[in-house]
Image: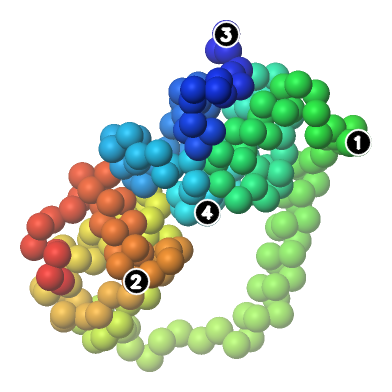
């Protein structure tokens, strides 16, 4: 079994992340930005938040479960998301291992999936009944070549990377030199561009001639 994160010694920097915590991060959240910092051995990784790393709610859930499996501690996804950076998450893990910060017993939420699914189906049926009167077929199909702007969300994730690569590969032949707008969380336009580019590189999709696209 893996050992828990050890308390930093007096000779170590509190900003550095413990190797076993980094292993959990790699196994559960991954991503191009995390891999880039690890390759560069960049100490600033500890100051980044889960949002900075482009982590979605499903990955936070996996991280919560992995901490339970590896260290036998319970830290909810909400607690993890509320921490400002990875260093503070690591400190929370250490305190939780010592039995601290347990002001009230945690209650496990039991979800009856069959009930949830059936309620979802009923909601979809109701919504469809309300909207179907407004549905009408297109008089003529819309050609992709007529699009002037494409707005792409989720382009720092797995699916978004492949969609963006497909758009960039075909933008001259099929999309008539359309403008592609990508939405990404970042402090600046240049930082957003680097996040998107790093993600394409991570999945081996990046083409050098896209630099000026």
Residue topped by disc 2: 189
Report how far apart the C-alphas of labels 4 and 1 lie in the structure. Answer: 27 Å
Q: Residues within 10 Å of mark 3 (few under 14, many from 20)?
A: few
Residue topped by disc 4: 51
Q: Secondary structure at mark 2?
A: helix
User: Can you give x and y, in whole percent of width and height, for residue 143 in the image?
Assistant: 26, 82
Q: Residues within 10 Å of mark 1 (few under 14, many from 20)?
A: few
Residue that lies at the very extreme toward the front in this rendered image: 10
Residue drawn at (43%, 66%), measured in percent from left and top? 187
Q: Is residue 41 above or below residue 166?
A: above
Position of the N terminus, as image quadrant, is top right
Report how far apart the C-alphas of labels 1 and 3 lie in the structure. Answer: 28 Å
Report how far apart the C-alphas of labels 2 and 1 lie in the structure. Answer: 43 Å
Mark earlier in primary sequence (3, 2): 3
Residue drawn at (23%, 66%), measured in percent from left and top? 167
User: Can you give x and y, in whole percent of width and height, for residue 130 in the image?
Assistant: 71, 80
Residue topped by disc 3: 1
Residue drawn at (54%, 41%), measured in percent from left and top? 86
């Amino acid at each position: 079994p893996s050992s828990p994160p050890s308390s930093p010694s007096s000779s170590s920097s509190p900003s550095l992340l413990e190797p076993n915590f980094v292993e959990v991060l790699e196994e559960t959240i991954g991503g191009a930005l995390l891999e880039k910092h690890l390759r560069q051995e960049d100490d600033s990784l500890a100051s980044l938040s889960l949002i900075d790393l482009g982590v979605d709610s499903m990955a936070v859930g996996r991280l919560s479960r992995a901490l339970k499996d590896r260290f036998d501690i319970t830290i909810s996804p909400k607690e993890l998301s509320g921490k400002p950076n990875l260093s503070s998450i690591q400190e929370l893990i250490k305190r939780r291992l010592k039995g601290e910060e347990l002001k009230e017993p945690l209650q496990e939420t039991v979800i009856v999936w069959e009930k949830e699914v059936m309620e979802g189906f009923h909601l979809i049926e109701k919504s469809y009944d309300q909207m179907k009167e407004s549905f009408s077929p297109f008089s003529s199909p819309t050609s992709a070549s007529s699009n002037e702007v494409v707005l792409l969300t989720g382009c720092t994730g797995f699916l978004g990377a492949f969609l963006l690569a497909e758009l960039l590969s075909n933008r001259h032949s099929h999309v008539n030199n359309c403008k592609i707008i990508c939405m990404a969380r970042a402090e600046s336009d240049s930082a957003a561009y680097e996040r998107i580019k790093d993600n394409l590189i991570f999945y081996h999709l990046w083409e050098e001639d896209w630099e000026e696209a």
